Image: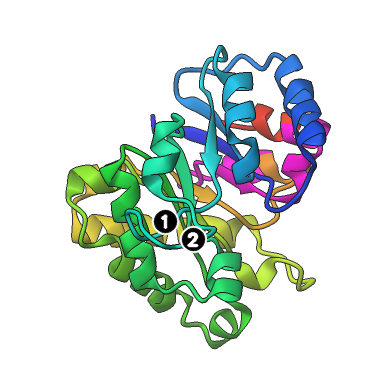
Amino acid sequence: MRKQIAAANWKMNLTYQQGEKLLGDILKADNKLADHQQVIFGVPFPYLMMAGGAVTEENNYDVAAQNCYEKKSGAYTGEVSAEMLQSINVKYCIIGHSERREYFGETNQVLAEKLNRCLENSIIPIFCCGEPLNIREAGTQNHFVAAQLKQSLFHLSAEQVQSVIIAYEPIWAIGTGKTATTAQAQEIHAFLRSVLASQYSEEVADEVSILYGGSVKPNNAKELFGCPDVDGGLVGGASIVAADFITIIQSLK
């Protein structure tokens, strides 16, 4: 069975002390994860070592950086390299979140370089893709997300692609008042898997975990995660409320 993953994205929220308490509260719930289940906490850079220490004795719990820079090293004040992340034992990194694309102008080509830097440093990328409202309304979402995969992932070998986690974000359904249905989530996830199968093989595509990133909540997680091609979620707001994220973890297949 593919890895079923509950990935928390804290974004730019919580003080160090609040983050420490949140982790403690979630870990105290003592959710026993099966071998195919995983929880990943995507925390701000200053909290990576604290979070890593908190989960070090936990089975199938880990931490992720929320971003890295596309260059290996150099005079890039304020940036963080994949090599730096690797040096503090960070094993996962969120790449290409819709907010990074929108607010910081990250292109598919830049994200391809970030993927390269992560893989060179044995960091598993959580690669985000998804379409905005105007693309969904035009009915061209399949073409749009296929281009994101093609331009950022398809230079990778089959072995490398199998190590990447994909997170689909229906940007049009986040903060717009519109809601993505479970059927829409399954449809686009199945399409993404078919794109991978066309480029590589069905066997390769079947190994890739594809997470749903469209406002996963305690009251919809079980239904969403029950879809055959939805392998968990990349969770924003609900991941910084201990009770909510605990319920989401418990909703994994």
**Dot 1: element:** helix
Q: What's the residue at 72%, 41% (across, down)?
A: 239
Q: Position of residue 5 (x, y in %)?
A: 53, 35
Image-based side of 180 in relation to 5, left or right: right
**103 up-or-down from 124: above or below:** below
Q: Disc 2 on helix, strand or loop?
A: helix
Seen at 76% across and 44% down, the residue is: 238
Between residue 15 and residue 92, name the one nearer to us: 15
With 188 as the anchor, is 54 left or right in this view?
A: right
Residue that badge 2 annotates = 187
Asked if residue 146 can be seen in this view, the reply is: no
Q: Which residue is mark 1?
A: 190
The type of residue carrying mark 1 is: Ala
Does 21 appear above or below 100? Answer: above
Q: Quadrant of residue 124?
A: top left
Residue 235 covered by magenta stretch: yes
Residue range of the region highlighted in magenta in the rendering: 222-245
